[in-house]
Amino acid sequence: MRLPLLALLSRGPAHGYELKQDLEQLLGAAYPQPNIGQIYVTLGRLEKSGLIEGEEIAQSSRPNKRIYRLTEAGTEALRAWFEETADEPRVRDEFFMKLALAPRTGLADQIALINKQRREYLNTMRNLSKLSATEDRDNRIAQLLIEGAMLHLQADLDWLERCQEELEGLE
């Protein structure tokens, strides 16, 4: 959450609710929305680390609000983030760990685990398809997010199929 907030602040000063609305509008309903408390905690940490600075703005009929702006250190952190590549392919996978350890424990059947995981992925794909149909078609970022998630799910389903074929071949 830290770096996306910095990226939003690079456009100019904003308060926490504006940043939450910007994220929701940009990413749509497919992206897990942060709660406002999480945003304000993160903003506090960013301010303590010198990446942003906050200023209290008095409001006559409402409580004061705090407006945040990016510092030079924040801009540099953002530049560094954009220079980095994304994480390596998923190697530490909780499902795979379950699959690998199931025979050693005798508590779960590998094929049953695969089938259960497959059902979960298919349900998630159905939900994403419904969401894609209701999401604003003009919000290309949200549509790309949904499409990317569905492509990852399809790859995971293909991999589950491969695991099942391999494990059934061992029997």
Image (cartoon, helix red, strand yellow):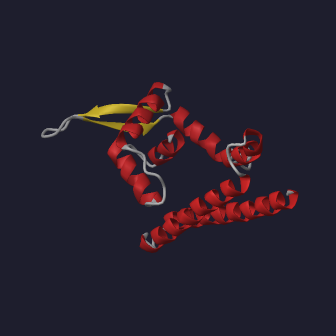
Is residue 130 in sight in this rendering? yes
Left or right: residue 137 versus residue 92 is left
Quadrant of image for the C terminus: bottom right
Among all residues in the image, which is located at the extreme right? 170
Residue located at (44% from left, 35% from top): 42
Q: x, y (%) of residue 119?
A: 59, 63
Q: x, y (%) of residue 61?
A: 12, 40
Left or right: residue 95 versus residue 15 is right
Front residue of 124/118: it is 118
Residue located at (47% from left, 32% from top): 46
Task: Please tell me how many numbered marks the rendered image carries.
Answer: 0
Front residue of 41/131: it is 131
Q: x, y (%) of residue 74?
A: 53, 36
Front residue of 28/138: it is 28
Front residue of 28/132: it is 132
Residue 79 position by quadrant: top right
Among all residues in the image, which is located at the extreme top? 48
Residue 147 position by quadrant: bottom right
Is residue 15 in sight in this rendering? no
Residue located at (87% from left, 57% from top): 170
Residue located at (68% from left, 64% from top): 157
Q: Is residue 46 above or below residue 119?
A: above
